[in-house]
Image: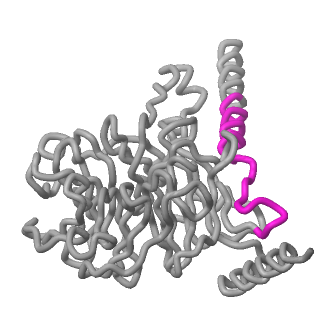
Amino acid sequence: MKKLGTWRAIAASFALTFVTTACTQTAQQRETPVFFPPAPALPRIQYLRSFTGVKDIEEQSSFNRFVVGEKENRQINKPYGVAVHDGKIYVCDVNATVYVFDLQAKTFSFLKGATGAGMLQQPVNISIAADGTKYVSDPARGQVVAFDKNDEFQKAYGTPGEWKPVDAVAFQDRLYVADMDHGLIAVLDQQSGERIKSIGNSGEPSKRLDRPNNLAFDDQGFLYVTDVGRFQVVKFDRDGRFVMTFGKLGDNLGHFARPKGIALDRQGFLYAVDASFSNVQIFNKQGRLAMFFGDGPDKPGSLRLPAKVSIDYDNLKYFQEYLQPGFTAEYLIFVTSQFGDRRVNVYAYGHQDGKYYPTDEELMKQIEERRAKERAAQQQP
């Protein structure tokens, strides 16, 4: 009886330790609310949390830790591309492979098809089609590698040594690939892999690409290309006709120094990463800066050498617990940082309940009125 009582005491001790540890881990995962823009402005974006390695998603009980020891803290080294699909966050580590944070299974692993014929050398970017097909751009391998909805290797596009594919996005039956070596977008047939045409390497010099590195499509089929050589984002129609540009070289808001990843929401707002400014700038359809977020001191919500931005409408349920009461999320924003303790940062775009938010037109009118008052004040003797 005495021995039985001892074992019960030990079990109770482990149970208490487990509950205490679990509560501590939950408290640690819930960061202090950070909003952009900061108060007193109405909040639009809330920083939720980040993912860097196995400890950010896999749970380990105190008993398991006691029996088998602490899990190795496997982490992402240098992330670039990020995409989200069916409860999984896919992250390109340029120094390793594509890692997968499974939000439902709560596991951290690598893309299972990235072995053998699907082996990756320097995965830079990833995009995911509606059917679950993943397109991974690997400039060191010299190919775009496709994986199916089950993450198995499917096929590879392009001939190594003939180009430098740094991003690839599927649209309808075509695959659009940014070829940085030749300063163009190669348009391929998704089935055969044959090149149909090229975009951005003909016409007037002012409408040509220089060093394209990131791609995105909006809901209307317009193609957006980050060009690190032009220090701009260039907009084309799906047939390759030049439409307009966003930003220019400079160190002010609305300008770029090292433009990288881009994404578009369903309202047509363009999210553009700038690594030098350590922020994400948001432009409206007319190319005007609407807001920005991510810069500032090294703390939750800030970015360090950001690389890619991705927008997701389908996986909000996995992050509801991190939302500040009274703030309603409309979609998620994922941004990778290549340095720091928070490599994959998750934000929510939304609104504070019960508050009126001015429209884009109203905001522009307010800005113009303020500028007019400032000019009038300057002209007074």
Could you say where residue 85 lies in the image, as x and y percent from the top left? 40, 62
What is the span of residues highlighted in magenta in the rendered image? Answer: 17-42
In the depicted structure, whether residue 335 falls above or below residue 327: above
In the depicted structure, whether residue 284 falls above or below residue 188: below
Q: Residue drawn at (76%, 77%), measured in percent from left and top?
A: 371
The foreground one among 222 and 145 is: 222
Q: Residue drawn at (54%, 61%), measured in percent from left and top?
A: 255
In the depicted structure, whether residue 202 falls above or below residue 135: below
Q: Residue drawn at (69%, 71%), measured in percent from left and top?
A: 328
Q: Residue drawn at (20%, 72%), measured in percent from left and top?
A: 202
Q: Left or right of 36: which side holds 280?
A: left
Quarter holding the N terminus is: top right
Could you say where residue 142 lies in the image, as x and y percent from the top left? 16, 47
Could you say where residue 151 lies in the image, as x and y percent from the top left? 26, 54
> Was residue 125 drawn as part of the magenta stretch in this picture?
no
The foreground one among 366 and 93 is: 366
Could you say where residue 16 lies in the image, as x and y percent from the top left? 72, 30
Q: How many marks?
A: 0
Can the viewer see residue 149? Answer: no
The answer to which quarter of the image holds residue 320 is bottom right
Q: Left or right of 45: which side holds 120?
A: left
